[in-house]
Image (tube, rainbow, N blue to C red):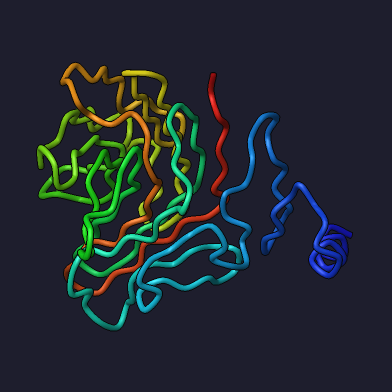
Amino acid sequence: MNKLICILMTLFAFSPLICEAKEPVKLEKGFEWIFDGKTFKGWEGNLKWFRIEAGAIIAGDLEKAVPNNEFLCSTKEYGDFELRLQARLVGNDYRNAGIQFRSKRIENHHEVIGYQCDMGVMGENNIWGWLYDESRRNKFLVEAPQKPVVDHFKKDGWNDVVIRCQGAKIKVAINGIKTVEYVEKEAGIARAGIIGLQVHGGPAQEASYRRIRIKLLK
């Protein structure tokens, strides 16, 4: 029955649900989809490195190296919000990606500037949920404790990511485990910008993103 409903809803393009391989996903109150699961509407980037499969955005390639960082970015900017999505990162030895927010593109360049919720492994550290400042201060602003995240982490599976920005405050959680509670104290740091989905330059890997929805905060 659920499969039949998904087929009918896809044909008639009507639903507050995203249909996927197993069960439809109901949209939480106050949230809106910013990825429709089928097209790149509302997003821009180098589509040589991004594709859509089974309701997910897949960045990178398991068969060839990525020459440099690539970002698929929202065409709309967001200030105070709660962003929810699922992310997955697969590869042989190297895995690194991230979710940009309150960011902007560097003109005529593949890079972006702004906050990043990091994803990946750096040495012995699982850096999922760490807060990095991409192309600006170029450093981790928050390094999350390892054990709570690792205990609830799905290495080759989908992990739930929540990013909440309100004023100077930023919070991040991975699979319900808080990794970041940060207050920006430096003047001149943008409090609005695009959302970007990254695959890091380097050896072959795939970063996947799905169920991307957002709630604007007052």
> What residue do we see at 54% from left, 18% from top?
218
Q: Nearer the viewer, residue 202 or 2?
A: 202
Residue 108 percent location from the top left of the image? 22, 65
Q: Quadrant of residue 130?
A: top left
Residue 31 percent location from the top left of the image? 63, 35
> What residue do we see at 57% from left, 43% from top?
213
Left or right of 154, for residue 132: left
Residue 120 percent location from the top left of the image? 25, 51
Left or right of 210, for residue 208: left
Q: Nearer the viewer, residue 213 or 103?
A: 103
Q: Quadrant of residue 65?
A: bottom left
> What residue do we see at 41% from left, 20% from top?
166
In the picture shown, does residue 27 fall above or below 167? below
> What residue do we see at 18% from left, 31% from top?
143
Residue 211 percent location from the top left of the image? 57, 50
Left or right of 31, for residue 51: left
The residue furthest bottom is: 63
The quadrant of the rendering that contains the N terminus is bottom right
In the picture shown, does residue 133 fall above or below 1? above
Q: How many marks?
A: 0
In the picture shown, does residue 90 fall above or below 47? above
Q: Quadrant of residue 124?
A: top left
